[in-house]
Image (spheres, grey):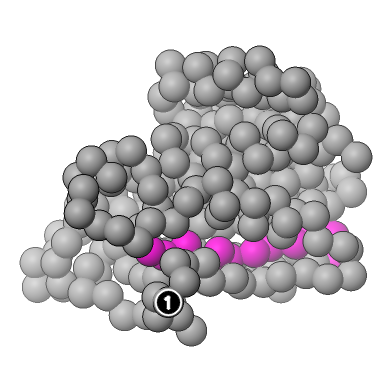
Amino acid sequence: MVRTVVVAGVGPGLGSSVAREFAAQGDRVALLARSAEYLEETAADISSTEDGTALAVPTDVSESDAVEAAFETVHERFGPVDALVNNVFSTETTSGGILDATEAALAGAWEVRVAGQFRCARAAATDMAEGDGGTIIFTTSQSAVVPSENVTYSTARHAVRGMARSMAADLGEHGIQTVHAVVDGWIAKPALRERYPDHDRWMDPDEIAVTYRRLVDHPETVHASEIDLRHPGDELSF
């Protein structure tokens, strides 16, 4: 069966790998992110492969209307959404505890990492509930399950975990599987490899993408709710 898969948050690294993995299986993939140029290049590259069908949908997830319009575009082009990989992220990081944190930093972390994923999940779930169900995967990090001194980042990550768990309880009756994926460790992205040339424990984003695809492939009677992905030998989060 050919599926319609939306990958929200496509950049060099995991998002791109996930899109390519689903496309390689013959699925139609829609790519969402703010960078129109990168999306167009990636979609064209995927579509040039034997089984690849990809659509670039430049989207600012901080705007509700933009997210709703993006999912309407996907539905019109490919039909109902079967899977959403909610990989929305921000390149901005804020370090420091509560004594140094500002409300502006909290608002910034919340707007993209929480509200952005919420908007995408709501749009996908609405489409799935009106159809035959589907799968929604949230990407977060270890900070979603263990304490972190980076209070704004950790707060946002915990919120996404709570959202995923709430949706799992709410959407099961609609045939929608909701998975919280804790992806921790060092993902082999070009920018990180350049920044940390001496690091030697990298997670291959292509291999993580295979795991994501298998989560979507799960039979209807078997649902995953949370999964911890990391380099072999690294300490588990829970």
The N terminus - image quarter: top right
Local crowd at mark 1 within 10 Å, few (<14), some, or many (≥20)? few
Location of residue 177 with respect to 63 vertically, above or below: below
Q: Position of residue 56 (x, y in %)?
A: 58, 22
Q: Would residue 155 be counted in the magenta stretch?
A: no
Magenta highlight range: 173-185
Residue at 14% across, 67% down: 96
The reply, left or right, for residue 61 in relation to residue 102 is right
Location of residue 163 with respect to 145 vertically, above or below: above
Q: Position of residue 114 (x, y in %)?
A: 44, 55
The reply, left or right, for residue 165 in relation to residue 229 is right
Residue at 40% across, 80% down: 235
Residue under circle 1? 233
Q: Position of residue 93 (x, y in %)?
A: 23, 52
Q: Would residue 184 be counted in the magenta stretch?
A: yes
Q: Splitting the image into 4 quarters, where does residue 20 fall?
A: top right
Q: Position of residue 80 (x, y in %)?
A: 81, 36
Q: Is residue 72 visible?
A: no
Q: In terms of secondary structure, what is the magenta stretch mainly?
A: strand
Location of residue 151 with respect to 102 vertically, above or below: below
The reply, left or right, for residue 186 in relation to residue 173 is left
Residue at 38% across, 48% down: 188
Location of residue 181 with respect to 107 vertically, above or below: below
- Give 44 or 145, whichever is nearer the viewer: 44
Q: Secondary structure at mark 1?
A: loop
Q: Splitting the image into 4 quarters, where does residue 28 fall?
A: top right
Q: Is residue 78 visible?
A: yes
